[in-house]
Amino acid sequence: MARGILRGCFWLVLFTVASAVAHEAGAPLEGPLGADDECEATDGGAAGECSVELRQLRAHSVKAETKDEAVTEEGSELFGPNARGRNMWRARTWTDIAALVQFNESVQGPCVAQTGATCSMFACKASRGATDCVKMQCQCATGFCAQAGTCYPTSPTQCLEDTGGSCTVSACRSSRGGTYCDSGKCLCNPGNCAWKGTCFPATDTGGTCKAFGCDSSRGPSTCNQGRCLCQDGYVAVKGTCVTPT
């Protein structure tokens, strides 16, 4: 009789402890268990798909993702060479293109000086960008690379404004981006740079943030790898981030 009472008490205590542990674990496992409930509803709770191990794995993934998000938020740097910019442009910018040219990673291949044009009888065309006539060959000046016959600067703070398009008869095509017509030429609006006939937003203000954050005089900017770049929706004009015209 006494042995039966003791056995009943043992199972009652065990049930109480298990219920308390399950209640404490219920909150963080609600997401993974919710997914398992859906699994049970769709395939009848197959052992291979909705096992305890699977539930534990999903719970561990949720906790790991939460931890990673917390580390990213707390460990992000506001300035310095390792800083990661916030609210940056998602569309391609001149800063991105200049980096490709500078590190010889563009689709046209390594940075070369030869434009393919000659200057034996006439000077190099202004539309080719910054060029020098060397041995009757139009070569890009120092700091410029030839892409499709035109010299482009490798610095994100320098760029060309001439798209190569004409507006003598009709307006500049909208596919060229933000442009205006000047003396029959389609030129990029201030804060934009021409690349292969299209204008891209210039975001590098020329300022650095390796030791301190970007100065407030630069406008809505963010520090990215030690450089002060304009935030999404703003372009750099004379070192300040402004609204595009």
Image (cartoon, rainbow, N blue to C red):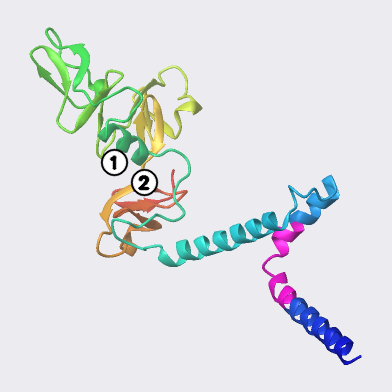
Image quarter for residue 96?
top left
Report x, y in % for residue 126: 23, 22
Q: What residue is shown with label 2?
A: 203
Report x, y in % for residue 64: 55, 60
Q: Which residues are magenta?
A: 21-34
Of 239 and 80, the residue lying toward us: 80
Q: Is residue 85 left or right of residue 50?
A: left
Q: Quadrant of the C terminus?
A: top left
Q: Residue at x 31, y 36 (%)?
A: 98
Dot 2 alpha-carbon crowd within 10 angstroms: few under 14, some 14 to 19, many 20 or more: many
Q: Is residue 235 left or right of residue 110?
A: right
Residue 153 falls inside the magenta stretch: no
- Please tell me the numbered disc located at residue 239: none
138 lies above or below 111: above
Q: What residue is shown with label 1?
A: 156
Q: What SS does tag 2 mark?
A: loop
Q: What SS does tag 1 mark?
A: loop
Q: Residue at x 34, y 41 (%)?
A: 95
Q: Residue at x 76, y 55 (%)?
A: 36
Query: Could you give the CA–CA distance between mark 1 and mark 2, rounded to whole angstroms?
Result: 8 Å
Tell which residue pokes out farthest to the left in this image.
135
Q: Main secondary structure of the magenta part?
A: helix
Image quarter for residue 63?
bottom right
Q: Residue at x 43, y 52 (%)?
A: 231
Of 68 and 178, the residue lying toward us: 68
Tell which residue pokes out farthest to the bottom in this image.
2
Q: Amino acid at mark 1?
A: Pro
Report x, y in % for residue 235: 39, 47
> Pointer 1 and pointer 2: residues touching (CB < 8 Å)?
yes
Q: Amino acid at mark 2?
A: Thr
